[in-house]
């Protein structure tokens, strides 16, 4: 006992002390109110589920990130959620069961067994919104807009938006005849951004030369909106699925430019690292001085089907602890504390009750306290009445 | 895959769908605002900690209730919190470090590996308040009053309050010469409320006859406030510690009767089942029709010392999911939803933005939706302007 390291928290696990907790709580309410004003209904999924339910429709990365425990009641394996999106998809499909588009939002702690980058927490408080039941790019645009509103409410400035489309890489892999394993290997190599490695790998697959060139070109397709015109040319041998993906991206980009003329847009058609279960348009928001994205999302039309009922879906999420940290210069107004003396006068008691009911914070001194708590004003008796001084 | 049981949640694990989640969120804000108005500062402890830190100052029952996982980074054992009180005590001692009394509150999910009674969740959302730095019964009274305010905010009616004092049983055990193991065995038997079993057990300990009688009398000391007068007589051979405990209870009872003349008080000097780390006054609130307590707490002066710095403490907690369920007849006003058509008119966009900014909920129809979401009014174009109909 009493090893002083006992009081250290594990790597990537944080706690919030009063000032930061108050800032986060304020932002929490603003974000949930924002979601509500867009018609997104709040749901509270459970912290644990049976593992097979929790991992439905997700990739191996989320499995690796999920802490597992044995349920002493059922003997089955439980997972502690590493991502709330699959939980909310299950709720949309199995609980809400609406024919009309379903808009849901959520906010809660998740845990990640391995963590990701240095800058990332292993215990984010994930906040997000998901829209089920529409395949139209207007639903992608809606969630991107809502994500930008979230960042605005959080007070983040100089946001830029990255856009991509998972369907481009997937379509090219399929068309070029790669096996599932080959596609996964190529995916890994693409993330390292080396055209030489891409070439070397594809040669081991006996891939036709024209496809080697296409994948090398894909790696170079990043930059401003002109990338989309370039893609149409460079990927001209690609089939309908890829052409459709490019034109969806173009449509989203056009709408976003019209709505937010000064928002910097960036395109990267080979950057898919963070997407586990997405199938279409993907997007991420960045701010200067923070190395990872501050929010991200995308379309994931295949997940609901694995939950037993096909339903297109798009959504985004962020870590509200990151948002609160990045907005830390916005000072949370500390509530003014009124100090009341240790006195049993019933009139004092009533005065305190009324002050509290009117939203003021009142702390009453205890008979045995050595030091006064910090306060901004005091309750004193003046001409027989209790007044705040 | 696709076993339909996949979508069942484990026993004792619940999720909250929109109506209940909205009710809980409303109550959450009211309770945190209440705590704030009493000068209790909100903190957010982490969902997991190193197990040795998490279990500091707690009893074996909390250990059994704690899910354990291995930290892949440090190799050490982590515990998923089953109770936030020890976390908040650690924060008070190691992070806040104030000489003045420290008032903290918290709200978050906890997990219990085994669950307790049928009626209890294994995934409560624990809400509570803790007051550090005062040994005076006025601090116990303060947290009991705050607990009653919580129940009032939750709209619970016909609350009754149970009061006890852990020091009575502890003092008698010590004075009668029981070993630690004997005390634990006697504790278990006392919970079964059988005077015969108490006698049989104490005989195996070779306990003096006068103490057998005292423990048998202890078992009968439950009922209204007259129990305290009876206790002074029945336990007259008990020493100073026990007499002091009884008179503390008497003092608390007197103050509570003066403040809440119509609040039913119930005393049980042998009922200690739910108290893991308490050392003094303990209390629990009950409402008709719910078999377990709806909130409970007590004094725990020994925990902070195990965290390396002695500090008296008292506090209480509740499961806000239970509070929200019991107040389910208080209808949460569903936010009225305004339905906007699928139309790209910039004026429509501005109208929607203004409505949302004014706190209204607006959902815009998507081009491919088969069904309309439920709504209470519609945005229509009338004489060239968008109006809510």
Image: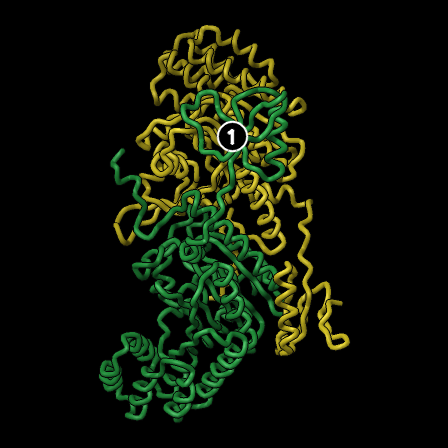
Chain colours: A yellow, B green
Q: In the rendered image, is residue B381 in sight? A: yes
**Local secondary structure at mark 1:** strand
| B289 left or right, relative to B345 | left
Residue that extends furthest to the front in the rendered view of this protein: B383
Looking at the image, which is closer to me, B308 or B221? B221
Q: Where is residue A196 in the image (x, y as percent from the top left)?
A: 49, 16
Looking at the image, which is closer to me, A298 or A129? A129
Looking at the image, which is closer to me, A70 or A371? A371
Q: Where is residue B194 in the image (x, y as percent from the top left)?
A: 25, 79
Name the residue carrying label 1: B339
Q: Quadrant of residue A305?
A: top left
Residue drawn 58% across the image and 23% down it: B381
Residue drawn 32% across the image and 85% down it: B215
Looking at the image, which is closer to me, B173 or A177? B173
Q: Quarter holding the C terminus of chain B?
A: top right
Q: In the rendered image, is residue B79 in sight? A: no
Q: Which chain carries label 1?
A: B
| A24 left or right, relative to A85 | right
Q: Is residue A208 above or below residue A169?
A: above
Residue drawn 45% across the image and 6% down it: A237
Q: Is residue A315 above or below residue B30?
A: above
Q: In this view, does B166 lie above or below B39?
A: below
Q: Where is residue A186 in the image (x, y as percent from the top left)?
A: 42, 21
| A368 left or right, relative to A51 | right
Residue drawn 27% across the image and 75% down it: B192
């Amino acid at each position: 006992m009493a090893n002083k390291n006992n009081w250290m928290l594990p790597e990537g696990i944080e706690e919030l002390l009063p000032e930061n907790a108050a800032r986060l709580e304020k932002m929490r309410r603003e974000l949930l109110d924002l979601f509500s004003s867009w018609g997104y209904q709040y749901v509270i999924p459970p912290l644990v589920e049976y593992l097979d339910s929790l991992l439905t429709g997700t990739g191996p990365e989320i499995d690796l990130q999920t802490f597992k425990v044995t349920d002493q009641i059922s003997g089955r394996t439980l997972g502690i959620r590493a991502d709330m999106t699959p939980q909310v998809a299950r709720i949309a499909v199995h609980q809400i069961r609406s024919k009309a588009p379903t808009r849901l939002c959520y906010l809660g702690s998740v845990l990640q067994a391995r963590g990701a980058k240095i800058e990332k927490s292993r215990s984010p408080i994930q906040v997000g919104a998901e829209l089920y039941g529409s395949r139209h790019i207007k639903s992608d645009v809606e969630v991107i807009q809502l994500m930008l509103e979230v960042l605005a409410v959080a007070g983040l400035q100089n946001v830029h938006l990255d856009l991509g489309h998972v369907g481009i890489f997937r379509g090219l892999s399929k068309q070029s005849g790669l096996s599932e394993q080959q596609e996964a290997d190529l995916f890994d190599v693409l993330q390292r951004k080396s055209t030489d490695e891409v070439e070397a790998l594809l040669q081991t697959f006996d891939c036709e030369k024209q496809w080697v060139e296409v994948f090398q070109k894909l790696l170079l397709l990043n930059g401003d909106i002109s990338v989309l015109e370039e893609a149409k040319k460079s990927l001209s041998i690609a089939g309908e699925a890829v052409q459709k993906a490019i034109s969806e991206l173009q449509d989203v980009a056009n709408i976003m430019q019209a709505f937010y003329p000064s928002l910097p847009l960036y395109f990267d058609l080979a950057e898919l690292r963070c997407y586990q279960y997405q199938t279409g348009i993907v997007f991420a928001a960045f701010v200067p001085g923070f190395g990872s994205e501050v929010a991200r999302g995308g379309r994931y039309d295949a997940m609901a089907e694995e939950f037993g009922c096909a339903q297109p879906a798009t959504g985004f999420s962020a870590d509200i602890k990151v948002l609160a940290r990045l907005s830390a210069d916005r000072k949370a107004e500390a509530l003014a504390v009124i100090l009341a003396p240790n006195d049993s006068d019933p009139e004092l008691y009533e005065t305190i009750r009324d002050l509290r009911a009117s939203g003021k914070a009142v702390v009453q001194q205890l008979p045995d306290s050595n030091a006064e708590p910090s306060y901004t004003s005091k309750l004193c008796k003046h001409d027989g009445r209790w007044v705040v001084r």
